[in-house]
Image: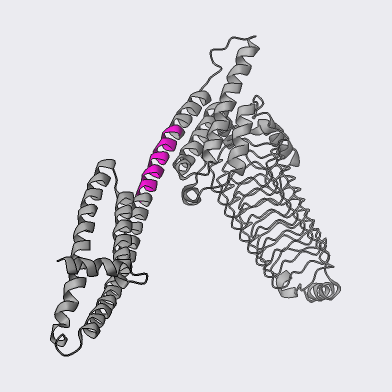
Amino acid sequence: MQRILKRFVSQLTRPNSALRWAILSIAFHLCSTTVCAQQAASSPQEGKGSNIKMIILIAVGVVVFLLVLWFLPERQLASWKDKIPDPDWLKLKNETRATLAQILGGALVLSGAYFTYANMKDTERIADSTLEISRASLNATQSSQLAERFTKAIGQLSQSQENNQPGHKPDQQSSLAVRLGGIYALEQIYSGPDNNSKEYHLPIVQIFTAYIRDKALWREREQAILEDQKKQTPTCESDIQSATSRSATKGTLAIRTPIGLDLETIIGFLAHRKWASEEQENNYLDLHGVDLGGLGQATLAGANFDRADLSQAFLEHVRLPGAQLRNVNLKRAHLEGADLTNAVLAGAVLTNVQMEHARLEAAHLENADLSDAQLKGAILSGAYLQKAVLAHAYLENADLSGAHLEEAELVSEANLKGATLSGAYLNGAHLSGACLAGAHLENAHLNGAYLSKANMKGTTLAGTDLTGALLDGAQLQDTDLSGTVGLTWDQLSRAHIDDTTKLPLPLEERRRQEQTAK
């Protein structure tokens, strides 16, 4: 036994002993495994238990390693002991032990690296799990705080002035300040960067629209609408004075107080808010019957009210240049004198709308329904009205110069008396039965237009292109057609003309021939 211990000690004390390096490798591997186990432990008690287990594992591993390293070469080289000298046999046995030690040491180092990596991944997983728990906790805290802010803002917005007595201006100002604070708080929640604020987008919009309807609803609108229905639009042959008195009467209907700062702030927010993705599909601003004429000269340039319900609303003189009003419902709305320059109203419902003297230059009204619309004196120069419906529309003295009315529906006595349509594009437009008496159609494009039974008495048509236009039953008395382009005798033979109708020279000669033949 003493001989074996001496040999073992001599192997450990040698400078380049493979046995010593193998033992150090085992110790490094087991120690690193112990450290990783301590890091991965979720509690001090668990870490303490892991340490005891690892100490036992280290001791057992060292003993097993030494036994294998010492006795395995002895057994493998036992058959060579009698065949070679003792010094050579001892040398061969030591070399075998060194080789075996290196192999076992390398395997232990690799296994140590693997277990270290596995423990690091476990540690990373635990860290990620802890981070997720922290995030969930933070999200819950933020949601709770956001709910508190929302509830508080609603309370501020409901602050009313109804209990304030006349003459108590400080109380009124204080109430307004509280409401404004609630409005701004809701705007901040709506514009919040976190995902929690998204669930409040639609409720905030609905709360704001309900607030406007409550504070700015024109209480007498139903009576005004009933009175409006009793009034008749002047016909093409009626006195213009009746239309003038009618417009004056409409101006007296919208008697109201100026809009408050709280309403103006909400309207500004709704007009320019950045739509959330869920609003793109479900957006619906219910502002029917509200009175926002008190906005006065406030500019809502570029406002976005797509698909909003503004039916029966009062928006006189409101400035909405470049506004987005696609598919908006403006049925029976009042927009007298409003500025809608470059506005987009494609597909909008504008039936019975009151837009006398409104500005609609270069506005987009494609496929819009303007049936029975009141547009006396309105400015629609350069407007886009392709395929728009203007049945029974009242456009007396309106400016439609350069407007695009291709395939527009101006049938059923649409009134364009005295309107300016110079340079307008009316290709394929339906003007059957329309009133164009005294209208200015210089250089207009009426190619293929339907003008059957249209009243065109006194119409100016210098340079107008009538190629292929249908003039069956059109009234052309007292009309100067001498400067028209593309007009044929076949077209004229189906229209109503007399001696007051001026024709191009070739057609004038044809008329004389026809009269002589009779």
* Residue with the most extreme bottom position: 83
Q: Quadrant of the N terminus?
A: bottom left
Residue at 69% x, 44% y is: 301
Pick whichever, 341 or 2, lies toward us.
2
Residue at 62% x, 53% y is: 390
Pick whichever, 80 or 107, lies toward us.
80
Is 463 left or right of 94, judged from the image as shown?
right
Pick whichever, 149 or 121, lies toward us.
121
Q: In this view, does 431 lie above or below 360?
A: below
Give the percent coordinates (x, y) of residue 4: 18, 69
> Is 110 colored magenta in this rendering?
no
> Is 130 colored magenta in this rendering?
yes
Residue 92 in view (yes/no): yes
Residue 218 in view (yes/no): no
Give the percent coordinates (x, y) of residue 509: 84, 75
Classify residue 456 by image quadrant.
Answer: bottom right
Pick whichever, 91 or 203, lies toward us.
91
Classify residue 182 by image quadrant.
Answer: top right
Colour scheme of the picture: one colour
For the image, the number of numbered tags is: 0
- Looking at the rendering, the stretch of residues picked out in magenta corresponds to 129-145
Residue at 64% x, 13% y is: 170
Is 189 left or right of 381, judged from the image as shown?
left
Residue at 76% x, 74% y is: 486
Q: In which quarter of the image is the C terminus?
A: bottom right
Classify residue 48 by image quadrant.
Answer: top left
Give the percent coordinates (x, y) of residue 111: 29, 67
Give the percent coordinates (x, y) of residue 499: 82, 63
